[in-house]
Image: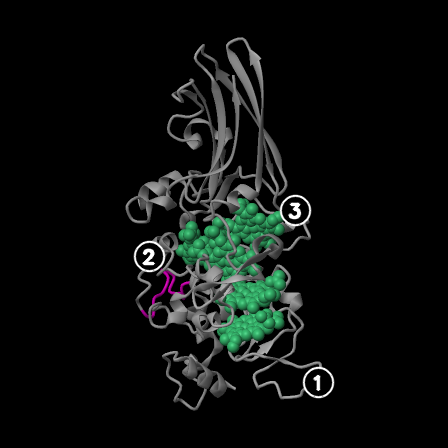
């Protein structure tokens, strides 16, 4: 079987070493690069290649890379260990193939640097849950049974690696160059396909950092992650990097957009503003609704958003604003963030946190109103409120300025509302 994969890859010109008769690591399906799937799944490949899954390793994601170097060390070093002498847990989700093979030098194989690849997810044969029998957390690859010889999908189609025989009668198995079982709908069409890496993660002190799965459970929703994050999209058919004129395909969107996507973050929040004039004050009520079955924002603990509400004259000159430096300091009701703290009760960074001090993000399906009193001058013409989404909290931004691309430090407009006087 592995020999067949090897031959097929060799025919594609994939530079790998297949001479070893015994099952070498490189003959595992995990080392079949996404480029080899591109030949027949080019549209999905293109979506994936631009996704955070394809860019999740410390060598590709500048934000994760910066944290990884700080908390663990050099991603180009083999045998890297955490301060506690353990295998770097991060790799179990961010570089799953390296973790599966217990390696830490991420440039040693393309599949290590590639992050969460096609053959990572599609080699899952079972979701075991995120708690081990001994009560310890099972992260990423530890939460799944992973096959090194076969791939899986949800369709119900029967596949064969052989050529479909001439004159075969229905039902004819579909040819797939890599062994494929299309019988895993229960896994691939449910949250189980995501929860191994997205359910929750705590730091070494047991403080929860990410809890998208817990949030989702609390919302008692029955809509799966895929309904939103892998919606069916109809895109132009692609062949060898070019659009095939007039032809389209419908596929589950493998972009899997989240906080990095300026459009996705506008999907989850609805904001409206009502105002009432009282003398030279304008009383504004903002109503914020989270339309999602997880928090807004969810995910990494430094994701946050804040409200900027300001008044302007007819030329757009700002006359008043609800904060000077940042709402976290100057207007806490306008800051929606997950506050991790140390033993001293002061906010701290994720690896050092021993407690959650507060969580002012919008809970699943929560509606929150926030009131403002805005001084009105004779020149005031516009009052505008903006919900601004940030990947990182201000102190972390300060530290990473100049070290990561600038656009990762810029807040993105998630929602706006305005009135004209
Ligand atoms: C993060 C996990 C993940 C990654 C990475 C991933 N997939 Fe998928 N893929 C899924 C899930 C989940 C489904 C099922 C979606 C559904 O049916 O709701 C799926 C479905 C598919 C399908 C079936 C399409 C259809 O029309 O129903 C194909 C083909 C596929 N993936 C190919 C790929 C290829 C090629 C890559 C890499 C370029 C890739 N996948 C990367 C999770 C993943
Ligand atoms: C020679 C063409 C070819 C190559 C190369 C190829 N596939 Fe496929 N694949 C197909 C065809 C044909 C189907 C069935 C119809 C469809 O979904 O397009 C399919 C279906 C799938 C499915 C859906 C399984 C299900 O549920 O029925 C997945 C997942 C998938 N391929 C993943 C991959 C991955 C990952 C790679 C790269 C390692 C890959 N394929 C390489 C042709 C190919
Ligand atoms: C093997 C682990 C793994 C699996 C399985 C997985 N993911 Fe991910 N996912 C990651 C990692 C790691 C990242 C973060 C990449 C980064 O930012 O460095 C990520 C990023 C994302 C993001 C983007 C976040 C952002 O910052 O923009 C979304 C959305 C997402 N995943 C959704 C899904 C969905 C939906 C599924 C199930 C179909 C899924 N993932 C399955 C590991 C996984
Ligand atoms: C109703 C649609 C919907 C469903 C269902 C849904 N999400 Fe989301 N998700 C969104 C939207 C919109 C965003 C962007 C806003 C945000 O970050 O909260 C998002 C953001 C995310 C992010 C990005 C976090 C980051 O750091 O950038 C991740 C990861 C994620 N979702 C995972 C999941 C998982 C896992 C599930 C299933 C348990 C799920 N989502 C279910 C709509 C949805
Ligand atoms: C259980 C799986 C898992 C483990 C273990 C894990 N992460 Fe992540 N990490 C994710 C996922 C999923 C995302 C993206 C979606 C989100 O925000 O939840 C992410 C996002 C991040 C981000 C934000 C990246 C960006 O582009 O904004 C950083 C930084 C990060 N992780 C650092 C680490 C470090 C450092 C470790 C190890 C100490 C680690 N992670 C361990 C799953 C994991």
Mark 1 or 2, nearer chain start:
2
Q: Which residue is mark 3?
A: 219
Give the distance between the C-alpha atoms of the residues marked 2 and 3, in whole angstroms. 35 Å
Mark 2 or 3, nearer chain start:
2
Q: Is residue 30 magenta?
A: no
Mark 3 or 1, nearer chain start:
1
Q: Is residue 82 magenta?
A: yes
Tell me which segment is drawn in magenta.
Answer: 78-88
Which of the pair 18/79 is nearer the observer?
Answer: 18
Label 1: state its secondary structure. Answer: loop
Residue 410 is situated, as x and y percent measured from the top left of the image, at 38, 40
Q: Which residue is mark 1?
A: 169
Give the distance between the C-alpha atoms of the residues marked 1 and 2, in whole angstroms. 57 Å
Residue 121 visible in the displayed image? no
Disc nearest the viewer among 1 and 2: 1
Q: Residues within 10 Å of mark 3 (few under 14, many from 20)?
A: some
Give the distance between the C-alpha atoms of the residues marked 3 and 1, in whole angstroms. 48 Å
């Amino acid at each position: 079987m592995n020999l067949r994969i090897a031959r097929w890859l060799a025919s594609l010109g994939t530079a790998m070493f297949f001479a070893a008769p015994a099952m070498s690591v490189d003959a595992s399906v995990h080392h079949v690069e996404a480029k080899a799937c591109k030949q027949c799944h080019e549209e999905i490949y293109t979506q994936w290649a631009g996704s955070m899954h394809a860019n999740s390793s410390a060598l590709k994601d500048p934000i994760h890379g910066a944290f990884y170097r700080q908390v663990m060390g050099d991603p180009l070093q083999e045998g890297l260990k955490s301060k506690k002498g353990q295998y770097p847990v991060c790799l179990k989700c961010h570089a799953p193939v390296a973790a599966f093979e217990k390696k830490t030098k991420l440039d040693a194989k393309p599949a290590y640097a590639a992050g969460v690849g096609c053959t990572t997810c599609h080699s899952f044969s079972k979701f075991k849950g995120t708690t081990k029998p001994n009560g310890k957390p099972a992260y990423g690859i530890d939460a799944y049974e992973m096959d090194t010889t076969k791939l899986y999908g949800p369709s119900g189609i029967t596949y064969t690696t052989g050529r479909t025989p001439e004159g075969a009668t229905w039902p004819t198995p579909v040819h797939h160059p890599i062994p494929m079982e299309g019988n895993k709908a229960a896994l691939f069409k449910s949250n189980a396909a995501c929860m191994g890496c997205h359910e929750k993660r705590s730091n070494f002190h047991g403080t929860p950092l990410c809890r998208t799965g817990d949030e989702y459970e609390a919302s008692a929703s029955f809509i799966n992650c895929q309904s939103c994050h892998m919606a069916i999209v109809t895109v132009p058919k692609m062949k060898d990097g070019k659009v095939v004129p007039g032809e389209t395909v419908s596929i589950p969107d493998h972009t899997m957009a989240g906080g990095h996507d300026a459009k996705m973050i506008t999907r989850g929040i609805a904001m409206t503003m009502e105002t009432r004039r009282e003398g030279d004050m304008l009383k504004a009520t903002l109503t914020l609704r989270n339309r999602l079955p997880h928090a807004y924002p969810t995910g990494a603990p430094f994701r946050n958003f804040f409200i900027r509400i300001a008044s302007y004259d007819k030329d757009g000159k700002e006359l008043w604003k609800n904060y000077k430096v940042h709402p976290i300091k100057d207007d806490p009701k306008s800051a929606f963030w997950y506050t991790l703290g140390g033993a001293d009760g002061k906010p701290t960074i994720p690896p050092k946190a021993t407690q959650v001090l507060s969580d002012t993000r919008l809970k699943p399906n929560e509606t929150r109103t926030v009131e403002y009193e805005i001084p009105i001058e004779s020149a005031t013409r516009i009052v505008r409120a903006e919900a601004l989404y940030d990947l990182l909290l201000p102190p972390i931004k300060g530290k990473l300025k100049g070290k990561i691309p600038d656009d990762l430090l810029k807040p993105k407009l998630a929602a706006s509302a305005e009135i004209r006087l």
